[in-house]
Amino acid sequence: MDPRALYKFQSGLSVVSAQAGDDVGACVINTGLQLTSEPLQIEVVVNKKNHTEGVISKAGHFALIVVTEAADMLYIGRFGFRTSADYDKFAGIEHNTTVLGDPYTPENAACMLACKVVSSLDVGTHTIFVGEVVDAEVLSDVTPMTYNYYHTVLKGKTPAKASSFVKV
């Protein structure tokens, strides 16, 4: 079996974030997906070892931004290769707050979706959160970053906590 076949899925990179009281979490995911149009719902899949997973669980809501091709590896590293448990990912950068109270940065973002969690599913190493969209905003017309672009142009690697990680 060639696990690289899974790299052919056309998903994009997103940053999911949430705030529960003073606890803030944010991480890069490649599993943001629209599920239904009526009601408008999306899903995000977050590793249980990520601090952000616990914050979303406590908060009951999250923000999702779709990352654009303008993002570089420093931006992706800020949100993807550090833990929110001991690093403030929004420190020193422009950021806003959704109507539900979740932080997000408009930098390198095509759009923002504010979602309240309506369902969650334990899938072993990860939790699938289904969120009903309560607010949405287009932030840029720059092309959204696909996972293929991340791998081929930016030469990014799939971290072990990613839902798409397969040991090659």
Image (cartoon, rainbow, N blue to C red):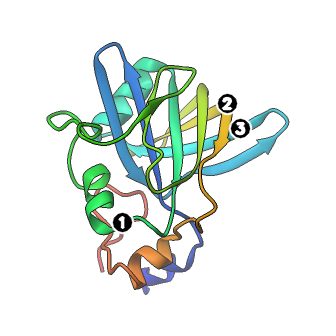
Q: Are marks 1 and 3 in contact (CB under 8 Å)?
A: no
Q: Which residue is mark 2?
A: 135
Q: Is residue 65 left or right of residue 27?
A: right
Whole-number angstrom distance, CA of label 2 to CA of label 3: 11 Å
Q: Is residue 124 visible?
A: no
Whole-number angstrom distance, CA of label 1 to CA of label 2: 31 Å
The N terminus - image quarter: bottom left
Q: Amino acid at mark 2?
A: Asp
The C terminus - image quarter: bottom left
Toward the top, the furthest residue is: 21
Q: Position of residue 47 (x, y in %)?
A: 36, 45
Mark identifier at residue 165: 1
Q: Position of residue 4 (x, y in %)?
A: 43, 83
Whole-number angstrom distance, CA of label 1 to CA of label 3: 25 Å
Q: Which residue is mark 3?
A: 41
Which residue: 49% across, 69% down? 69
Q: Quadrant of residue 9?
A: bottom right
Q: Amino acid at mark 1?
A: Phe
SS for dot 1: loop
Whichever of callouts 1 and 3 sits on the residue coming sooner in the sequence is 3
SS for dot 2: strand
